[in-house]
Amino acid sequence: MTREQSGRIESALVVILAGVSAALHVGKLPPALPVLQEALGITLLQSGFLLSMVQLAGMTLGLAVGLTADGIGLRRSLLTGLLVLFGAGALGGFARDATSLIALRALEGFGFLLVSMPAPSLVRQLVSPHRLSAMLGIWGGYMPLGTALALLLGPLAIFVAGWQVWWWGTAGLSLLMALWVWHAVPGDHQRRPRLAPVSRSSSRDGWPQRLHQTLRSPGPWLVALSFAMYSGQWLAVIGFLPSIYAQAGVAGSASAVLTALAAAVNILGNLAAGRLLHRGVPAQRLLYTGFGVMAMGALLAFATVPFVDGMGFPPMIRFVAILLFSAVGGMIPGTLFSLAVRLAPGERTVSTTVGWMQQWSALGQFAGPPLVAWVASGAGGWQWTWLVTCACSVLGVLLAWRLGRQLASRTATEHWRA
C-alpha cells in the first residue's frame, strides 16, 4: 500500500468518525429525557417530539441535499454540518423550556443531514474501488454506533455534571471533528482528478431529469416506504427505553448499559445483511425475517399476558426480545441500501434514490416516537405500544412482497436486454 493510499484510507475513517459524532447528537436525548422531564417540565408527548424533531430536516430536505451535495462541495457540506451541530448543541445547553429545545433539535437535524448525506460519496472518492465495499460497510454502522455510545456515556455525564454539560460536550466534539476534517480530508478540487469527468451541462441541467426519473419509478418509492416502516418503530422503541426502565425502577447505570446494548446489536444485523446478500440469500427473505422478528420482539417486550394477571412477560424474556428486535431488524436497512442501488432507475439516479429513501426514513423517525408516546399516554403505560410497531411491520412485509416482484421484474428485463 502506498503512502497516498494509506492517507486516503485514514481520511475516509475521519469522515466515518464525523458521522459517528453527528449520530451522537441524535442519540444524546434518550438518556436525558427523564432528567429533562423533571427539570423543564417536559410532557411525554413533548418528549416524543424532541426525539423526532431532529429528523425534520431529513424529512423535508433529504432529496434536495442528495441532488445538490456534489454542487456545493462534499467536504464543505460536511464541515458546515459539523459547525451547525456545534452551534445548536451549545445553545441547547442554555435552553430553559421545551419549545426552545425542540427548535434547536430541528436545527441539529439540519446539521446531521449535512454530515450524513455527503459522507458516503466522500468515502467513495477517497478509497480505491476494491476497498470501497469494506469502507461503506463500516460507514453503515455509524448510526447505531453513535447511538450506542450516547446511550452508554450520556447517563454517566448527566449524573456527574448535568444534562447541560452533556449537551456542551457533544457540541464540543463536533467542533473538534470539524477541525480534524478540515485538516485530514482533501479539498473538493484535490479529489476531482480521481473522478470520471462530468460535463458542465450535465452537472448544471441534469438534476431535474434525475428527479423526474426517480420519482416516477416504483422501485425508489417501495424502498423509501419500507425504510420508513423500519426506522419509525426502531427509534420509538430504542429512544424510549431509558424512560421505560426509569419507570420500572431500573438503576440509571444499568439502564444505560441495557439501552446501549440494545442499540449496538443493530450493527450486527447490518453486517449480516451484507454477508447474506453476498452469499445469494434473497433480499425479500431478509426483509420478511427482519420485519417478522421486529413484530414478535415488540409483542413479547410490551404486551401484557392475560393469564398472568395482566402482567408482562418475565424481564429476561422482554430484554432478549428487545435485543432480537434491534439485531434482526438491523438486516432491514442493510438490505434496503443494497436494493436502493439495484432498483434505482439509472446509474445517475443512485444518489437521488438514496436521498429519497433517507427522506422517508426521517419521516418515519419523525412520526414514530410521538405516535408511540400518544398511545402510551392514552393507555397509561407502554402495554399497547406493540400495536404501533406491529402495524409498521405488517406494512413492511407487504412492501417487501412488492419489492420482490419489482426486483424480479428488473432482473428479467436486464436478462432480456443482455
Image (cartoon, rainbow, N blue to C red):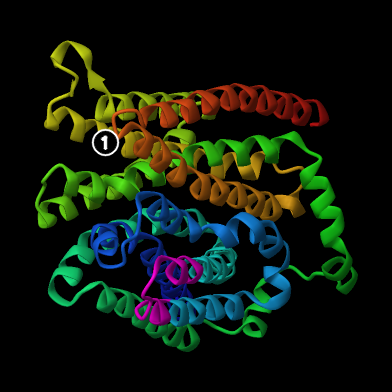
Residue 295 pos. (x, y %): 38, 26
Magenta span contains residue 346: no
Q: Magenta stretch?
A: 89-104
Residue at the image position 18 percent from the left and 45 percent from the top? 247
**Is 251 drawn above or below residue 415 in the view shown?**
below
Residue 22 pos. (x, y %): 43, 68
Residue 409 pos. (x, y %): 73, 24
Q: Nearer the viewer, residue 199 or 259?
A: 259
Mark 1: which secondary structure? helix
Q: Amino acid at mark 1?
A: Ile
Q: Nearer the viewer, residue 135 or 6?
A: 135
Q: Residues within 10 Å of mark 1 (few under 14, many from 20)?
A: many
User: Is residue 127 visible to us here?
Assistant: no
Magenta span contains residue 102: yes
User: Is residue 161 visible to us here?
Assistant: yes
Residue at the image position 19 percent from the left and 35 percent from the top? 319
**Is 30 drawn above or below residue 177 in the view shown?**
above
Which residue was labeled with disc 1?
322
Residue at the image position 34 percent from the left and 28 percent from the top? 384
**Is 114 drawn above or below residue 265 in the view shown?**
below
Q: Quarter of the image containing the C terminus?
A: top right
User: Magenta region's main secondary structure?
Assistant: helix
Residue 315 picture quarter: top left
Q: Nearer the viewer, residue 231 or 40?
A: 40
Residue 223 picture quarter: top right
